Image (tube, rainbow, N blue to C red):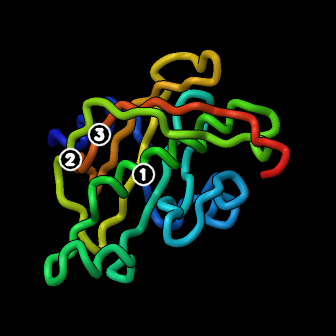
Amino acid sequence: MPKEKQLKNRLNIPSYTPDAPVVYDSIQITHRLPHRYPFQMIDKIIHLDAQSVTGVKNVTINEPFFQGHFPGNPIMPGVLQVEGLAQTGGILVLNTVPDPENYLTYFLGIDECRFRKMVVPGDTLVLHCKLLADIKRGIAKMQGWILVREQLACEATMLAQIAKKANNE
């Protein structure tokens, strides 16, 4: 078995096919996360349970960041890949409360981040996050991976905080 498939199987990352049913589409994601164009970095959620989540991002040449990164050689910035993982993890963390519309998640930290493959227009990112421990005092520790054509493109360990929205938000 190729190394990429072994990794995907070991991590238990669901396979993605465009016609598969979704848990949340892009409109439903806007009801969960505060991010909007051009900063909503996930198009759909295809798997969600108490411990893990899988999202999808279709990367097109029309992404605004490709104008400057890099002209003639478009590559998705690593920081935006990590943002996509953080947003995917935010969906997972918000899934742990009964009224997610009253909460926000904040990205607190990142460790052991590695970029393994360049992401270019036409790629479909499969973003997968899993909790590494129970959420305590509103702090979640997650491991995240991005696969492109079943090849590892990015991985990171992330910390996030879930917090109740202020009344004026």
Instruction: Measure the C-alpha gap from mark 2 to mark 1.
Output: 13 Å
The quarter of the rendered structure image containing the N terminus is top left
Give the residue drawn at x 46%, y 30%.
Answer: 159
Find residue 62 and report its horizontal and vertical position in percent. 38, 83
The numbered mark at residue 83 is 1
Q: Earlier in the sequence, mark 1 or mark 3?
A: 1
Say what amino acid the circle numbered 3 marks: Glu
The numbered mark at residue 115 is 2
Residue corresponding to mark 3: 155
Give the residue drawn at x 80%, y 34%.
Answer: 98
Give the residue drawn at x 14%, y 77%.
Answer: 73
| Residue in the foreground of this view, choosing between 53 and 34 | 34
Say what amino acid the circle numbered 2 marks: Phe
SS at mark 1 in the image: helix
Q: Is residue 15 visible?
A: no
Find residue 51 and report its horizontal and vertical position in percent. 55, 28
